[in-house]
Amino acid sequence: MDEYKMIDLSTIPLFAILPVCFLAGLFIGYGYFRALRATADLIVKEDQPLLALALTLGRLSLLITGFLIAVLGGGLALLATLAGLLCAKALMLRNIRKDAL
């Protein structure tokens, strides 16, 4: 069996793949921005620089891996993943602003 046919996500219908990619983008975005906040807190406190470095590498690898998987689904799947990531960013910023008040 051809290995390219086994991982071809373009054969899955769009109505099934787009919501999954959006939810994956929400998950990736939540993890990314949560790790970004933890990294910023570690840098401000000047505490555990190796943990801050590990969090930075971890969040970048999560982002790259998620988008590479989304690319296999095509352009619309990539856009749906990006939309989920941006929605997660908006939700995280709204929660931070609500906590600041």
Image: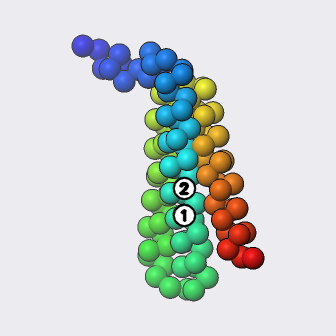
**Where does the image place residue 71, in percent across and percent down from the top left?**
52, 31
Q: Circle 2 — which element?
A: helix
Say what amino acid the circle numbered 1 marks: Arg
- The front one of 3 and 10 is 10
Residue located at (49% from left, 34% from top): 20
Q: Quick one: label 1, few (<14), some, or many (20+) residues within 10 Å? A: some
Q: Residue furthest right?
A: 101
Q: Residue furthest left?
A: 1
| Residue 70 marker | none
Tell me how far mark 1 sits from mark 2, CA to CA.
Answer: 6 Å
**Where does the image place residue 8, in percent across and percent down from the top left?**
41, 20
- The front one of 30 and 57 is 30
Quarter of the image for the C terminus: give it. bottom right
Callout 1 touching callout 2 (CB < 8 Å):
yes
| Residue 30 marker | 2
Residue 52 vertical placement versus 29 (above, below): below
Q: Is residue 19 rendered to the left or right of residue 82?
A: left
- The front one of 90 and 45 is 90
Q: Quick one: label 2, few (<14), some, or many (20+) residues within 10 Å? A: many
Q: Quadrant of the rendered structure where residue 18 is?
A: top right
Q: Is residue 79 rendered to the left or right of residue 70?
A: right
Residue 81 vertical placement versus 47 (above, below): above
Q: Which residue is mark 1?
A: 34
**Where does the image place residue 82, in percent across and percent down from the top left?**
62, 40
Quarter of the image for the N terminus: give it. top left
Q: Quadrant of the rendered structure where residue 7 is?
A: top left
Residue located at (54% from left, 22% from top): 15
Say what amino acid the circle numbered 2 marks: Tyr
Residue 96 vertical placement versus 45 (above, below): above
